[in-house]
Image: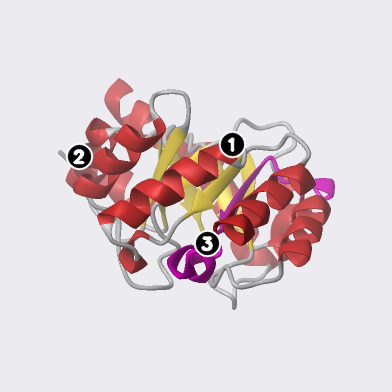
Amino acid sequence: MDVIKNLASYVDHTLLDISAGPVDIEQLCREAVEYGFASVCIHPWHVAQASELLRFEKPKVCSVIGFPSGATLTEVKMIEAMRTVEKGAQELDMVVNVGALKAGDINTFLKDIFMTVEGAGGVPVKAIIETGLLDDDQKKQACALAVKAGASFVKTCTGFNCGSATVEDIKLMRASVGKSVGVKASGGIKTYDHACELVAAGATRLGTSSSIKIIQEAIGG
């Protein structure tokens, strides 16, 4: 049971369905407390409600910035980060400007992350690099630049574009950022075995909407 509790502590219990309402967020937060998940990961609209529900509980409130395309203007991402933190977000998952990276516009790519980090005001920012859209050299470059811009984590995917969390990508990302930066695996994590493989490969956080299924699978043997 300790192993299961330990795995739950890696999980961002995720609900990014745009049709989700207050009742769904209440259930998500209740589940996060019951299972001991690291956080709930939700859209900015729900942050104030989740922050109130989890005010005296261990799970954190994580929200998304520039989601899911990453093509939002940099100043908009910065303001979104500021306002979301003001409403109680304790972590932010921001989508990087993949188009700028692939076009070789490194200054725009760096500034986009840096200004989001500035807007977050000390709240950890996870930079989602969309591994499914990048080759290995670009993944390494995206990770290095994200760290340079002040991101606390690098993250595989939004789950809304192509690609998913793979052991190979987690190993590559961990090697790129070293031990001092978090690596979040997200996208297509649906089984206990897959979750354990990703942690073993170097993931320090897992983003999944199959959180309860994974833990119940572990409990069931």
Horizontal arrangement in the rendering, residue 52 relative to residue 179 (left or right): right
Amino acid, disc 1:
Pro
- In the picture, the disc for residue 59 is 1
Residue 127 location in percent, x, y?
53, 50
Horizontal arrangement in the rendering, residue 46 relative to residue 192 (left or right): right
Q: CA–CA distance between discs 1 and 2?
A: 23 Å
Q: Secondary structure at mark 2?
A: helix
Q: CA–CA distance between discs 1 and 3?
A: 14 Å
Residue 43 location in percent, x, y?
64, 63
Q: Residue at x 35, y 47 (%)?
A: 140
Does 138 appear above or below 161? above
Q: Residue at x 48, y 49 (%)?
A: 13
Q: Nearer the viewer, mark 1 or mark 2?
A: 2
Residue interval drawn in magenta: 85-105
Residue under label 2: 197
Mark 1 and mark 3 lie on one chain; the one further toward the N terminus is 3
